[in-house]
Image: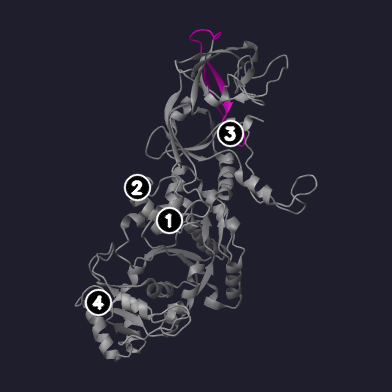
Amino acid sequence: MNQPANLTATDFVADAVRADRAAGRYGGRVQTRFPPEPNGYLHIGHAKAIVADFGIARQFDGVCQLRFDDTNPDTEDEEYVESIIEDIAWLGFEPDAVVYASDYFPDLYRWAEDLVKAGLAYVDQQDAATVSLQRGGYGRPGVESPYRDRPPAESLDLFRRMRAGEFEDESMTLRAKIDMQSENMQLRDPVMYRIRRSRHHRTGDDWVIYPTYDWAHGQSDALEGVTHSMCTLEFVSHRPLYDWYLAHLDLPGEAPQQLEFARLELTHTVTSKRRLRQLVTDGLVDGWDDPRLPTLAALRRRGYPAAAIRDFCAHIGLNKTNARHSLEELEAFVRAELNRTAPRRMAVLRPVKLVIDNWPADRVEWFEVVNNPEDPAAGLRRVPFSGQLWIERDDFAEAPPPKFFRLSPGREVRLRGAYLVTATGVDKDAAGRVTTIHAVHDPATRGGDAPDGRKVKSTMHWVSADHAVQATVALYDRLFLAETPGARTGEPLDDLNPDSLELLTDCWLEPALGQAPPGQVVQFERLGYFAADPRRPLWFHRTVGLRDEWAAINRRQQPESAGGRPAAGQSKGRPQAAENSGRPPAAENN
């Protein structure tokens, strides 16, 4: 089983596995599984489960399988199967096998018949609404079905006729006969099978009855030889049912055990598949891989490195308390990974023309620029420089405010790796908007340093107008305005951010970006990290900005010493990305 190198499990789950091995349980074997239902795309919450399932298996030299829990044909599709396989491979994991709950439909049916024969399951002819009402609620007693005590032979006959397709959809169910007065609602005679004439993406029309998740899940674990069945905390109440089913069946081996851990939730987003599907089907986002979504396909398209997601999941670990993690916390891992790996390039997103009036006509010079100061092996690239350049409009102020150190009339600045230039004047359109900035360069400052040692307070990026390639750049804000969408009204869509996407169509990039391979992530110097769209040439998505917002949040949360720093022993908690290419324009006003 091929796994990435950065997985270590040191948590209560690992402790439980370690104790089982010490006791000789399962003969020392460790087998896990990742069991998604193929009814949507995987999201960041699933990434935590993937890292946990594969990480535990790897730590204890075990195996981990991918099992599709495909028991609901109405919502499942081969598209989701393929996307899940792709996402897991992208994260860096290779399952020991790919299996399906539908592979076990004959076994599950046979075991269901065994429970019916033993008087532990019965066919109920009530509709779903009645069954739901009779189950009662917390503090309210359940009401037994009038069919609960029908003879096993009668239930067996009806169940076989259900299988044969004699009855209408939803007209009957098979229910386990457990305890209608249990404080645990999962044990109040749960439904095991329902009639549903829906074509299954793998079994076609072979079945007209389908098992419920709870009936299929633990039994699939047992058939596969799973030892430790990990799931999220909402399944704690399901564990007694998981164990009850297994205790009443003739299993091929020792019963697996269920272990629960906290799910991963992030601020400013939702991970409910139902909500994500609503965003997609209502056209509020551009498909399952819209870069504003938390799906793994969306994060990949936006440029999030798989290693950063793995590191983040390993960092938060497994615990038993649900918590919503800051999106900035995840972004800190993304930023740190990209700072190490992403090549640097120059791009101008909101351009204004800079004309160097004393530049010789038709002259072009080429400068060698470092590709990544964090990676000497990345080498150098050649960047053209001419007398007409694009610079950021925010890098010029005709009447500069206090502490503005970038370009303004009479002020000298450094053009990254090229020359020192001084603004001399501007051209404006009829509305008074600056269209062209005029400047002169000092020929003695080639490379950006003055031979007389004079200093300038700002270094700006630029792109040669004669060589630049035009591109579209998508800038993203949080998809939801509230940290916890829906907390105020109960409806997450009430907190949808109408300004979560800004498209800039008049961006100018250095020529090397004209051949950026699909999916490549680069740092636009001083602006942030951007990913080349996998399908649209010269279309870039902002992955994350250069500012480490989580570091600032974390500092505000730390107790401070008299010197204004975190008190001794207090961790800053997040990786810090050392950005050597300069701060964003907005950060240079101080």
Decide which of 302, 56 is in the foreground and name it: 302
Q: How is the image coloured?
A: one colour
Q: Which residues are magenta?
A: 357-386
Say which residue label 1 marks: 42
Q: Is residue 587 in view from this perspective?
A: yes
Of the residues under marks 4 and 2, which one precedes in the sequence? 4
CA distance separating discs 3 and 1: 32 Å
CA distance separating discs 4 and 3: 66 Å
Q: Pointer 4: residues within 10 angstroms few (<14), some, or many (20+)? A: some
Q: Residue 144 in the image: state x and y as whole percent.
A: 36, 86
Q: Secondary structure at mark 2?
A: loop
Q: Pointer 3: residues within 10 angstroms few (<14), some, or many (20+)? A: many
CA distance separating discs 4 and 2: 36 Å
Q: Amino acid at mark 1?
A: Leu
Decide which of 527, 411 is in the foreground and name it: 411
Any magenta on residue 369?
yes
